[in-house]
Amino acid sequence: MSFTHTPAARLAETGPLSDAEQQTRIDLAAAYRLAALNGWDDLIYTHISASVPGEPGHFLINPFGLGFDEVCASNLVKIDIAGNIVGASEHPVNATGFALHAAVHAARADAFCVMHLHNTAGVAVSAQPAGLQPASQHALRFYRQLAYHDYEGLAFTPAEGERLVAHLADKPAMLLRNHGTLTVGRTVAEAHVLMATLIKACEIQLQAQACGAQLIVPDAAVATRTAQQLFDGGAVEGGLEWPVLLRKLDRIDRSYRH
């Protein structure tokens, strides 16, 4: 696989990357590749964004026009909160698409990584009046911790941004009605693992509903206790899973690191 990027030219204009930024680039590129590998991508649309360590107000995002399986550390684009490119890049970005991410990054101090997808299972469950039901252990991770935002059309306005972050509040995940899924992570790994858990919960619900039988769900006390156990005192999720996922990617194609 080949990519059209000129990392040497970009470094010449912006200076060498810090170790922290380089690691964030690798992790974010890995998140894009994993999304593609899992079939979570939607052509060239949707985004995963991450803050640049040590550079408040700067973020990394995918080059608009490349597939998720083409993203690598060096072709990620650095932008500001308004979606303007910082430094040199031969690639454009989807500033309109970043607007949703920008609203969450600005509102949440813990929003290091914001992941928004149009995965089929998430969209399907978002369109159900009851949304995600506590019918699986995966779903119980989000028991009373899943936000919802009603669909308002394609144009994402500042006013909608205010409503979305108000609905999200301090929750780790959201179903955007008729639209998709969103997770917020203190690390790229956490945003990815939360998304994987949410998508699997949606997939389980849809398969369980396929036969038309009524879903069996735990009572509120069990659901609450399980959610607290899965929350694990607020520990950052993904720390154990992430190295495993990177090793998996490395066996398939290490070019995401370049």
Image (spheres, rainbow, N blue to C red):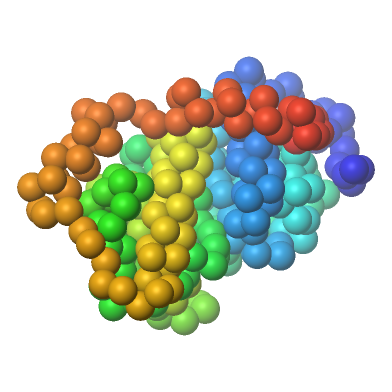
Is residue 83 positioned above or below 242 on the image? below
User: Residue 62, how many percent across, how many down?
Assistant: 67, 50
Q: For the point 54% across and 28% down, which residue is it?
A: 242
Is residue 82 positioned above or below 162 on the image? above
User: Residue 111, how many percent across, how many down?
Assistant: 40, 42
Q: Nearer the viewer, residue 96 or 32?
A: 32
Is residue 225 positioned above or below 161 on the image? above
User: Residue 172, how many percent across, how many down?
Assistant: 33, 47
The quarter in which the C terminus is drawn is top right
Judge from the rendering whether residue 148 lies leftward or rightward of residue 256; answer left or right: left
User: In which image quadrant can residue 75 be found?
Assistant: top right
Q: For the point 11% across and 54% down, which residue is it?
A: 219
Q: Is residue 17 visible?
A: yes
User: In which image quadrant can residue 21 be found?
Assistant: top right
Q: For the point 68% across and 51% down, which residue is it?
A: 36
Residue lying at the far top of the rendered structure: 19
The quarter in which the N terminus is drawn is top right
The total number of labels drawn is 0
Q: Nearer the viewer, residue 98 or 214?
A: 214
Q: Nearer the viewer, residue 245 or 59?
A: 245
User: Residue 66, how many percent across, how many down?
Assistant: 77, 56
Residue lying at the far bottom of the rendered structure: 153
Q: Is residue 159 visible?
A: no
Q: For the point 48% across and 47% down, which residue is it?
A: 196
